[in-house]
Amino acid sequence: METKNLKVVNQPVVKMDALGLACGEPAFTDDVEFKGLLCGKILWSPHAHARIKKIDTSAALKVPGVKAVLTYKDLPRVPHTTAGQGYPEPSPYDTYTLDNKVRFVGDRVAAVAAETPEAAQEALSKIKVEYELLPAVFDTFEAMKDGAPVIHDEEDSKNIPDAKRNIAAKFDFEVKNGEWFKEADFVLEHSYKMPYLQHCAIEPHVTIASFDNFGRLVLRTSTQVPFHVRRIVAQALKIPVKKIRVIKPRIGGGFGSKQEVLLEDITAALALKTGRPVKIEYNRRETFVSSRTRHPSTVRLKAGVKKDGTITDAEMEITLNTGAYGSHALTVMMCAGSHTLPFYKVKNNIRFIGRSVYTNMPVSGAYRGYGATQGFFAWECLMDLMAGKIGMDPVEFRRMNYIKLGEGSPVFKAMGEGREGVEQTITSIGLPAAIEKGLKEINWYAKAEKYKNQSGPLRRGLGMACMMQGSGIPEVDMASATIKMNEDGSFNLLIGAADLGTGSDTILAQIAAEVLGVKTDDIIVYSSDTDLTPFDVGAYASSTTFISGGAVKKTAEKAREMIIEVAAKIMGEKKENLRLEGGKAVSAAGASCSLSEVANTSLYYYDQHQITASASHFAHTSPPPFQANFVEIEVDTETGKIKILDYVSCVDCGTAINPQLAEGQNDGAVLNGIGHTLAEEMEFSANGTPLNASFRRYKIFSAADTPPIRTFIIPTWEPNGPFGAKSVSEIGINGPLPAVANALANATGIRLFEAPFTPEKVLAALKKANWILPR
Amino acid sequence: MQKNNLIEAKNGVFEITLTINGENRALSVKTGEFLLDALRRHGWKGTKKGCDTGDCGSCAVILNGLPVLGCLVPAVAAHEGEITTIEGLGTVRNPHPIQEAFVEAGAVQCGFCVPGMILSSKHLLDRTPNPSGAQIRKALDGNLCRCTGYVKQIQAVKMAAKRLKKTVAISRRP
């Protein structure tokens, strides 16, 4: 199949919600008014680890305007996970809506609802809490030692593999084909580290809980996972699913942080207590401290290589800091291996050792890249190190070893997300073309030659990194869609898929329009509302285009059958001679019947029925998108500052359903990755208090800081994807860190193993290497 | 210039008069209330709250011809002033060329930063009709975006500049 016959798919259709957003239409969670809305606020723990001995809310309740104060005494004690994952979630059940113990600075202590923010704030200050301070632990390796403070000592938590050693998740796996490192000419071993990183969606987390005319709870919330929110809130508060409706309006970015039940349970609890609508909105500091972060990681990677370029063995040990709770602890850790280990052929032995460890630090969770970011930092640095060791061109070395079309890996089957994976082979790969394109765009070989002899304090260098991700979680993720036809030949497309700013509503409409032979604006999209739209796991794991897109395509095909059936009767034609095109049913002989005539016939005249269809989709494979990244940098060896001169990112996402939106996804992912590389890091005091929980002190790149980023879409056709599509949203974030690390080594001979590569670190490394500037 | 018109609070509430998007308005604002909160409370929801500390630019509005951060300006400071919010620039039925350019260039992803970004662009293009790439980057520097990498937003401002020039050329025709 090819894209050349497609009319709507693979076109840069304008994002359907863009104009409203550009005009400031009230589209987000907090943009609507609720009569009698109370302001909810949460009291946060000032201690890293403590037990609540006494909590007195009487003075808080006396503050005028205060309607409710909740502590752990007021709520059912239900161990659950906040991770918005398929049921049963692979994350431990170690969280309580409110608990009598706090496990990090910024943990929930109590919640209030009041008529005004001022009253709520005053009430917080009047809650008297007596804490019994417990020893705290902040380092993962310390936390695993005998005698370390036990963070989850409660009896009723579930699925914690080794609570006594603070192990929230573990997974080991081995492929053994002989003696370890026997065939290797060289064995390399290094550890690579990433710090606490924040998503920094510009819209803070916000939830409004209210009631409908039947007294049902309605949660209007900034989420990537409306259906998981409904299920987890029902579980945590012990109310039936049927009593909850979750509405996802426009979302101001998520990047994984909103794949989490962060506010919905406590906001709902306050609404249920007061019988009034309640809003809780995080301020920016709270989004840094009390939401979710990337899992800080230590990846030890030991590998053997032969002089001819064969990778003989690979041992990957990953230790993640999951913070106080184990949200996504197992799955992020496994993805660090499952996305990286199949990527390069390892001839003999493969071992993966994974631990996610509790500490008294902020809670980690899902973050774009989801473990692959941490894993590829290590792998792509290693690839350059090994190439250097055997004297091979790093590009050639990668070309020789990356997985090829038709090939599989034992890792696919062994490692899934939280459980065994699914066997698969590569059914589309654009990496050869991506590498070619990137080499050409960055002018790799000519520049490499030029930079061999440099002098002066400014040194330039080139680096590259290749990678893959997935497209949804095979045999776990499921999506569904409903289409109904209107009199004018337009269609309502109802989807549970959660557009959080990615443009998924638009690309799903394009898929429906392509099947139904109409224009994208003939498709009216509604997403997502647990009362009105069918189930979808939500926006995560790079799944929406591939899984939800598959559901929409199937649904549209069913609707097409129904349309053709009616049209065949109107036209007196055989069904098999009809196709849909240009808003009409068209016969092989050239006769046609408009879709509005079909709709009117079915609705009003003959064999009356609503043309409507629903379908679901899940997948047996997760076809990886591939990417080749190239970067040119300039290092100021006097200040240690790295400047990115050019960043070229060539991505194979199969068919880009909407090339403009696909490019946009990648541009944003790359800049986020560049932020991780050069600047971003959450800092903490010795007692676990965050020190830079603001945009002023935690720097994300602004327009003036941003280097040239050039995304190129490398088209392939994925046979298992809708119109040949794979995913695109996450992969781009994984490239900058290893690519820049490699470029820094190329420019100066200095290799850094710990992100971010700040001027201080670069300078210290240059000094350590006795870097002397030739005069 | 700052006018010296004193107003007094009654029970912690100031009654201020101002022009918002070309219309005369009287707003009740609370003591200590910032312009961002006052605007949102009175229904101008296009002005967004991203950080409330003057760092992200989502709350940018144009006050007396200058882009300001609504979360840092006391609401009373807008008394007798003139404000343009994103709603005043254009509407879905009648969008401003900058809004159209942002849409067509693919510069709107989640769209939360976009009202502020567009108002910063407007301020730039009003003064610098032919901005260089560096001037655009500088003008958008106060508006943080985590979705786009700014790539298509910078393209959008370039596109808008071209279109606005054409509009000016047409309107100047005798």
Image (spheres, helix red, strand yellow):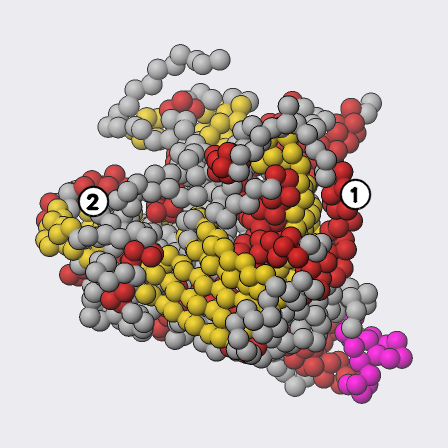
Residue A335: x and y in percent read: 50, 65
Closer to us: A392 or A672: A392
Quadrant housing residue B17: top left
Residue A135 visible here: yes
Region in magenta: A572-592
Q: Residues within 10 Å of mark 2 (few under 14, many from 20)?
A: many
Residue matched to label 2: A124
* Residue type, mark 1 in image: Ala
Q: CA distance from mark 1 to mark 2?
A: 64 Å
Quadrant housing residue A705: top right
Q: Earlier in the sequence, mark 1 or mark 2?
A: 2
Q: Are marks 1 and 2 on the same chain?
A: yes
Closer to us: A288 or A597: A288
Residue matched to label 1: A446
As drawn, the residue found furthest toward the right would be A589
Residue A278 visible here: no
* Residue type, mark 2 in image: Leu
Left or right of A724, for residue A215: left
